[in-house]
Image: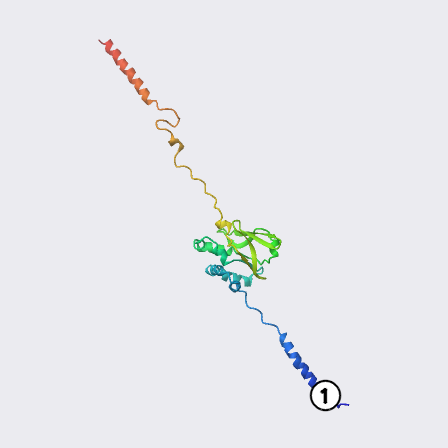
């Protein structure tokens, strides 16, 4: 029978082996450090085909606004990112022809002040409010329809589909679109202004020699008749005084 000292030594060795065996497992279960802040530019760079949209985000400073708002918003945000092909299909000079304010509103029109997943778009109430608005503060809207698993988006003058989800996790959803979304309020047909009245007064358009009442001017004929009577009277007076 083994002595008590031998059993103690065996027990000690066994415990040490168990500690060594469990140590790597315990280290693997240590909590990982939290991820860094969400960066919209990095998400688009990873997509690899949004160079023009990133340039507009930076030049209008909307990118900084989005990154800041994501940190504080309780509802999250949604971004529609037109691909480079979408911008290349525009008429040359379209973007350069816009003022800075119009460029800002154009970019903000691609931003929703709430997080939406693909499933959420199936039950939204149209129009869905965007970050863009008119001078009075009235927001511009987008309309969404779904067919099967496809989400369609319309501005009133542009219609396209949501294709690739670059990110679909609260608080930020980023979706690729293959057309630039132009708001109807800024780029749609303008209401024609009322036709200005003619500078010519209808009364002035009457033929020469007529009055406003429409009757001819009889002053010429009246003068001729008076002259004939006056001359006839002179003849009679001459005969009487002969």
Which residue is more in the foreground, 37 or 236? 37
Quarter where residue 217 is shown: top left
Which residue is more in the foreground, 226 or 166? 166
Quarter where residue 237 is shown: top left
**Residue farthest left in this picture:** 242
Q: Residue at x 66, y 80 (%)?
A: 21
Q: Residue at x 65, y 81 (%)?
A: 20
Which x, y percent locates residue 192? 46, 43
Side of 203 relative to 46 (left or right): left
Q: Locate the C terminus and report the quarter of the image it occupies.
A: top left
Which x, y percent locates residue 154? 55, 51
Q: Residues within 10 Å of mark 1 (few under 14, many from 20)?
A: few
Q: Secondary structure at mark 1?
A: helix
Side of 192 relative to 8 (left or right): left
Identify the image's colour scheme: rainbow, by chain, secondary structure or one colour. Answer: rainbow
Q: Locate the N terminus and report the quarter of the image it occupies.
A: bottom right
Counting every numbered tag in the picture gives 1
Side of 238 relative to 186 (left or right): left
Which x, y percent locates residue 4? 75, 89
Residue 183, above or below 236: below
Which x, y percent locates residue 123? 62, 53
Residue that mark 1 sits on: 8
């Amino acid at each position: 029978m083994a002595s008590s000292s031998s059993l103690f030594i065996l027990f000690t060795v066994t415990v040490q082996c168990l500690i060594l065996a469990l140590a790597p497992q315990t280290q693997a279960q240590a909590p990982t450090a939290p991820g860094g802040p969400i960066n919209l530019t990095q998400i688009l760079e990873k997509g690899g085909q949004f160079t023009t949209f990133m340039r507009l985000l930076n030049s209008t400073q909307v990118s900084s606004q989005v990154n800041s708002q994501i940190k504080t918003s309780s509802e999250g945000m949604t971004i529609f990112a037109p691909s480079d092909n979408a911008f290349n299909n525009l008429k040359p000079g379209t973007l350069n022809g816009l003022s800075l304010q119009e460029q800002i509103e154009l970019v903000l029109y691609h931003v929703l002040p709430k997080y939406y997943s693909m499933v959420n778009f199936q039950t939204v109430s149209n129009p869905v409010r965007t970050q863009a608005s008119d001078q009075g503060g009235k927001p511009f809207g987008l309309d969404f329809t779904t067919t099967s698993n496809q989400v369609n988006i319309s501005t009133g003058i542009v219609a396209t589909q949501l294709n690739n989800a670059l990110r679909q996790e609260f608080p930020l959803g980023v979706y690729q679109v293959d057309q630039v979304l132009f708001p109807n309020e800024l780029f749609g047909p303008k209401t024609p202004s009322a036709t200005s009245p003619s500078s010519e007064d209808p009364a002035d358009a009457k033929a020469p020699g007529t009055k406003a009442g429409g009757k001819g001017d009889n002053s010429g004929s009246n003068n001729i008749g008076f002259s004939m009577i006056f001359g006839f009277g002179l003849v009679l007076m001459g005969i009487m005084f002969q």
